[in-house]
Image (spheres, rainbow, N blue to C red):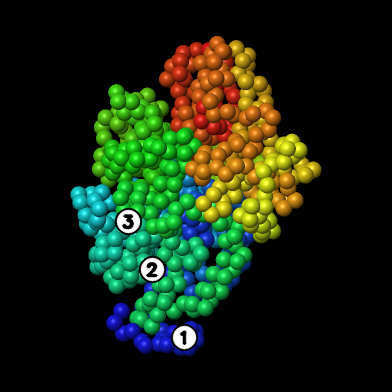
Amino acid sequence: MSDHNQVKITDMNYDVDRPKAENPVKIMDLSLRDGHQSLFATRGRTEDMIPVAELMDQVGFWAVETWGGATFDTMHRFLNEDPWERIRTLKRYFKKTPFSMLLRAQNLVGYRNYADDVANAFMDRACENGMDIFRTFDALNDYRNFQTVVPKIKEYGKHFQGCICYTMTEPRLGGKVYNLDYYVNKGKDLEKMGADSICIKDMAGLIAPYDAYEIVKALKAAVKVPIHLHSHFTSGMSPMSHLKAIEAGVDIIDTCMSPYAYRTSHAAVEPLVMSLLGTNRDTGFNIKLLARINTIFEKEIMPKYKHLLDDSKMSIIDINVLLHQTPGGMLSNLVNQLREMDALDKIDAVYEELPKVRKDLGQIPLVTPTSQIVGIQTVNNVLFDTPEERYKMITGQVKDLCYGLYGKTAVPINKEVQEKALKGYDRGEKPITCRPAEVLEPEMEKAKEEIGDLAVDMDDLVLYSIYPVTGKKFLKWKYGKEEPPASVKAITMEEVKAKDELIKKAKAGELVEKKKDAPAKGENTRTFNVFVDNEYFEVGVDEVGGSSILKYVQQLQVSGGAPADATVPVAPVAPALAAAPTLAAAPAPVAAPAPVAAPAPAAAPTPAAAPAPAAAPAQVADTDGTPLLAPMPGMIVKYEKNVGDSVSEGETVVILEAMKMENALAAPTNGTVKAINYGSGDSVAKGDVLCVIG
Ligand code: CO
């Protein structure tokens, strides 16, 4: 950093007046993956990446991260987009910049270890569709989970970037488990496996600047391959950590374009470019080009996503990460989960319980999927444990973890918890010690049989194998077998403008309370959350003469002994649907302002037949069966039993997915299944009657 050239910034022509740095810091841009994943719940659409793609290709990024992490899940589930198509489409615009993806090793782009045949098929398709760099991590830093995917990366001549997930048990680097030796040894392991570069993956923004310096320095001395730092901004330390890492000789840094930067995302590229300008580590980037790209993001793209920004607090720094080491994404998941369960007041208990659960489960790093595993088990403990019994409701994933299906934990799992979790576990009560995928049966053949002709090619089949429930739904949309719901449709700039207009009117007090002679709410009513400064409005919008898009079906009444109706009730769709096309023309009755914290669902879109009231028990009070109620909102994965089957108390009846974790719900009593009220893929609210046992 010594030989700073005194260049005059104001008169500078960035392309010609700048000396070439001896050892430029290379930059990977994350805007198109981790950026929108961190800030906008991964809702970025391919069509909104195209307007900046060609310009971004000109910047000189070492790579752009375009895929992986949550994109695969979110795209097919919420955006009705084929994730494979995104790689192919963007490749047409990025002609020279390599693509990088985040690969969860044997977890691929899902939340569990898949069998080797799925891993091989996925890797073939990712390579053939055009992915160049595979940033590979395992949530437990158990590199046995790399053993299937790495040879594939090599077979295709692609770049294998091995990650070390950065985590701590102390306020700073050190302690018995995650100390400097740990990271250096992991770095050496990765180099031995053939890593082309090594990434320190600091997903929660925990790395302190001087610790970053120490680790980078030590890794540079211990291994030959380039060192890459991925550090989220969450705690506010990352720009300082970047600079210290650069001083220690780091080769590559991750940043975002400024509209996608900060908060739980990453530091912006522009300040780093200016900080290094004229030094021997100058990136060489043209700041004017970056500014041009930013303008497009600001004017043409971001307005469509601003409603997804969490503007509930002023601070862009999350000090909870410093206090509790809870990563930002995990924290917002926990808060959402508690809110949906009307238990937001338990957040402090959750903070207190979380480190205990993590310790019980082997002090594992908190990153997908372990952050969900630890997070949801923590919520379950806080909500369902009693003074007499801990770990009363153990999720399927915690059982898998205890069995060894995710790999080896940094320290052994608490024996008592492990024994309890594995009691009656279907794979066996004795945990395994081998590479997890060795005990997994091949999955592709079975998947092929299940999905049949709906999977037209290998891309479809791999998607289905990883996401059987939502994947099947998506394939039905893709091939016109089912109409996709309004909630998966894109918002257009016209709709954004119409909504802004509405907000302006609301601010000016020009929106009046619902008139007495307002038309009856139709079947097409869609609900919008409208945020005006600190106030929150829920607005119901009815398209005049429009076709029915959403259907709210009355909650099925379970009457004594009668079999369940053949028609499966559709649970009410959560609020915050896509914008309505005729916003301005709509009668737009503005509901009374509700506090942002209110759990808001079901208020506006309530047709005459009241859907799914939260307090379901009353519905079945006079039946002769015992209802099994959803203990939390979620999606039905499958029923293990059919109507007429006999069950004994404690036997699993239904698998409910909540926050991506599967919960096996047990029969509350002995008896016969009298009614099953939902089907695979249905959303349910807390308290919904999932089935009746009599
Ligand atoms: Co990240």
Q: Nearer the viewer, residue 375 or 603?
A: 603
Q: Is residue 168 above or below residue 356?
A: below
**Residue farthest to the left, as pictured:** 176
Q: CA distance from mark 2 to mark 3?
A: 18 Å
Q: Residue at x 50, y 24 (%)?
A: 629
Q: CA distance from mark 1 to mark 2?
A: 28 Å
SS of the residue under disc 2? strand
Image location (x, y in percent) of residue 346: 38, 37
Residue 105 visible, this angle: no
Residue 230 visible, this angle: yes
Q: Nearer the viewer, residue 566 or 519?
A: 519
Q: Which residue is mark 2?
A: 252
Q: Which residue is mark 3?
A: 206
SS of the residue under disc 1? loop
Q: Residue at x 50, y 86 (%)?
A: 13
Image location (x, y in percent) of residue 626: 51, 16
Figure quadrant of the N terminus: bottom left
Q: Which residue is mark 1?
A: 10
